[in-house]
Image (cartoon, rainbow, N blue to C red):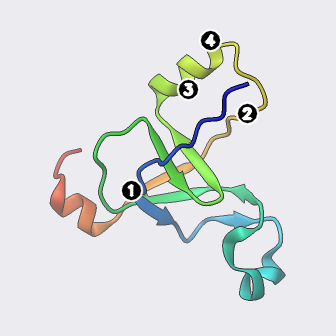
C-alpha cells in the first residue's frame, strides 16, 4: 500500500454560516471537531482542484468527477456554501 502526503492550497477560511457538530467545545478545542456544514469564504485562489480547510477538503467539480469514476474508497462528498471575500472580489473581478 502506498501512502501519499497532500499539501493542498489554503485559499480562504471558514465562513460565518459554518456549522460545527459540537458548538460548545469550539471555545476550548478550536475547530478541530467535525463540521456538519462547511461555509468556505475565498480570500484568494490559484486555481487548484483541491483545497484545504481543516478539518475538511474542498474539491473542484472536475476532481469530484474524477474521484467518483475512480476505484478510490473511503471518502465522502458533500455540498458546501462558497462565498467570496471583498478582498477576493477586488483581486479577481468577475471571477
Q: Position of residue 17 (x, y in %)?
A: 60, 66
Disc 2 to disc 4, how far (Cα)?
13 Å
Vertical relation: 36 (above or below) 6? below
The answer to whether the residue labelled 2 contacts the one labelled 4, judged by CB atoms less than 8 Å apart, is no
Find the residue positioned furthest to the front.
1
Tag 2's secondary structure?
loop
**Residue found at x 76% / y 88%:** 28
Q: Quadrant of the N terminus?
A: top right
**Residue found at x 42% / y 35%:** 49
Q: Quadrant of the C terminus?
A: top left
Disc 2 to disc 3, how far (Cα)?
11 Å
Q: Quadrant of residue 71?
A: top right
| Residue 89 in the figure: left or right of residue 25 | left
Residue 64 is labelled as 3
Q: Residues within 10 Å of mark 1 (few under 14, many from 20)?
A: some
Q: Earlier in the sequence, mark 2 or mark 4?
A: 4
Q: Which residue is mark 1?
A: 11
Q: Which residue is mark 4?
A: 69
Disc 3 to disc 1, how far (Cα)?
18 Å
Q: Earlier in the sequence, mark 1 or mark 4?
A: 1
| Residue 46 in the figure: left or right of residue 71 | left
**Residue found at x 27% / y 68%:** 86
Q: Which residue is mark 2?
A: 75
Q: Residues within 10 Å of mark 2 (few under 14, many from 20)?
A: few
Select label 2 or label 3 by which is in front.
Answer: 2
| Residue 39 in the figure: left or right of residue 24 | left
Amino acid at each position: 500500500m502506498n501512502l501519499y502526503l497532500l499539501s493542498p492550497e489554503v485559499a480562504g477560511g471558514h465562513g460565518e454560516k459554518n456549522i460545527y457538530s459540537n458548538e460548545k467545545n469550539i471555545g476550548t478545542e478550536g475547530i478541530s471537531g467535525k463540521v456538519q456544514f462547511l461555509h468556505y469564504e475565498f480570500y484568494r485562489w490559484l486555481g487548484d482542484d483541491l483545497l484545504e480547510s481543516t478539518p475538511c477538503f474542498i474539491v473542484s467539480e472536475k476532481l469530484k468527477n474524477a474521484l467518483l469514476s475512480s476505484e478510490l474508497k473511503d471518502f465522502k462528498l458533500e455540498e458546501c456554501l462558497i462565498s467570496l471575500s471583498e478582498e477576493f472580489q477586488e483581486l479577481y473581478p468577475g471571477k
